[in-house]
Every structure is written in structure tokens, then in C-alpha cells.
Image (cartoon, rainbow, N blue to C red):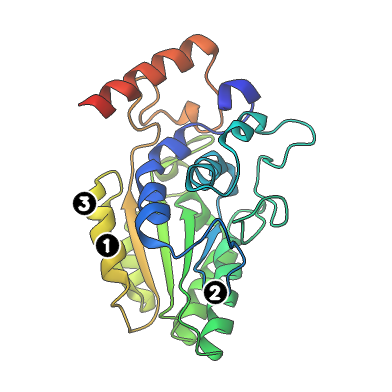
Amino acid sequence: MLTESKSGHTAGPLGLADIFAALYFDFLNVNPKNPLDENRDFLVLSNGHVCPILYAALANKGFFDKDELFSLRKFGSRLQGHPHRFSLPGLESSSGPLGSGLGQASGMALVLKREDKSNRVVCVCSDGEHQEGNHWESVLFCVKYELNNLVVIVDRNRIQIDGSTEEIMPLKSLKEKYLSFGWGVIEINGNNMDQVVHALDKSKHHRKGPLVIVANTVPGKGVSFMENNYEWHGKTPSKDEAEKALFELSKRRVA
């Protein structure tokens, strides 16, 4: 998909693959045959540039034909570099400006809570977005309104487009920061499926305010020359690199 587009982000989507598999095939109540079901759960992708993994999850879930994945970022495609709310079934929000997703998700969660609805809202965001001030305004908002129907998943992969998050604007312990703001916090290895599933299951029983899952992931997970290399944040593989990457990923699947 990314090689075909010659544009896009590779490392983040690979690091989030385990989380999106758990979300769409175990956790979220979503139905591709009725994408606007009023009882559905909502997913807001805040760091929209990792949308290849969202598109792949939606296609494999049956929201649209998998062949369409190869139209990523092409002129006229429904699969743009950031998701557009009305382009594809299953998309609940548009994204673009970083740090804005939690504001959208918290608004959805507040409306659902006031209407006494049981739908859950999940917001996936990046660690780099925690360098944005508007994200922290939303963090305060979620605590004030005790949004216990909201789960935030932070992709703590420690890279952004220009280097390490800790070199560019240190974030240190996000667990301690969220705890100090009054959130419930679960910290996991985001590439360990057992830990991912357990954390999501645990979130269903969390009743005291908003909950964040700090998911430590490996950017470029499963591809030796991409793992933990920030240069792959916003870079696509050549045809030869893609073949090597797919070979390495296929070996992991067999193992």
C-alpha cells in the first residue's frame, strides 16, 4: 500500500498493528453492515498520519474492499493521507492538526454520557501530540466531566519526524503525568497481544473517570531496518525494501 503510494508514514502503523487488531477484532462494537448503528462504539484517530493501519483494519473487518487499499493517497481516492469523516464507512472523525483528537473524542463521550448511552469512545493518539497544548486542555476537560466512557490509547513509540521525542521536547513519564491529572492509567507493552487485550478488557470495568492506556510500542515493529529508526516515521519503502519487509513479517507470522 505505502510502496504503491510513494507517500505516507510507515513506522507508526507497523507499531500500532497489534493494537488495531485487538480493537477491531475483539474490543470495538462496530458492524460493517451497519456502520451508523446508534449502538456502535466510536474510534477517533488523533494522529491521522498513521491511517494506513486504520484503513487496513477497516478493510479486513469488511467496511470496504481490500483492493481499494492500493489507492492510498492517490488523486480522487477515498483513502487520503489523513482520514476524512465522510469518505469511508467506519470513519468517525476527520484528522489533520495534531493534538486535536482528544478534544473531538471527549465531546463525543460527554454527549453519550449525558444521554445515558452505553457506547464507548476510544481515542488513539501519539506521544508526539503530547507536545501540543490543546491536548492537555482536553485532558483537564475529561477529568472535570468524569468521562468514564472514554479510553485513550497513547502510542508511546518515542519517535517523531525529526528524531526522538525525548531529544526534541522531553515527555518523560506519561504515566506519572496522567496520574497527576487524576486519570486512571494502565501501562503496557503495546506489541504484546495478551497485554493489549487484557488492558482493553480492564477498561470496560473502569468506572472512576477517564482511563489512558500508555502503550509502549516499537515503531516499524517486525522489520529489522525500520525498528526504532525515526527516519521511517514519514518515509515509504522502495519496492525492494517492501519485499524484504514483507518477507521478515511473514517469517514472524509463521513463527
The residue drawn where x is 40% and y is 76% is 210
Amino acid identity at mark 2: Ser
Tell me the residue that label 2 is attached to: 106
Tell me the residue that label 3 is attached to: 194
First in sequence: mark 3 or mark 1?
Answer: 3
> Can residue 180 be seen?
yes
**119 up-or-down from 78: above or below:** below
Q: Is residue 251 left or right of residue 163?
A: left
The spot of residue 173 in percent (x, y) is: 32, 58
The spot of residue 183 in percent (x, y) is: 36, 75
User: Which image quarter holds the C terminus?
Assistant: top left
- Near mark 1 (Cα within 10 A), the count class, few <14, some 14-19 or many ≥20, is many
User: Which image quarter holds the N terminus?
Assistant: top right
Whole-angstrom CA distance, mark 2 to mark 3, is 27 Å
Amino acid identity at mark 3: Asp
**17 up-or-down from 207: above or below:** above
Q: Which image quarter: residue 64?
A: top right
**155 up-or-down from 72: above or below:** below
Q: Which image quarter: residue 15?
A: top left
The spot of residue 224 in percent (x, y) is: 33, 21
The residue drawn where x is 54% and y is 74% is 106
Quick one: 209 or 174, which is closer to the camera?
A: 209
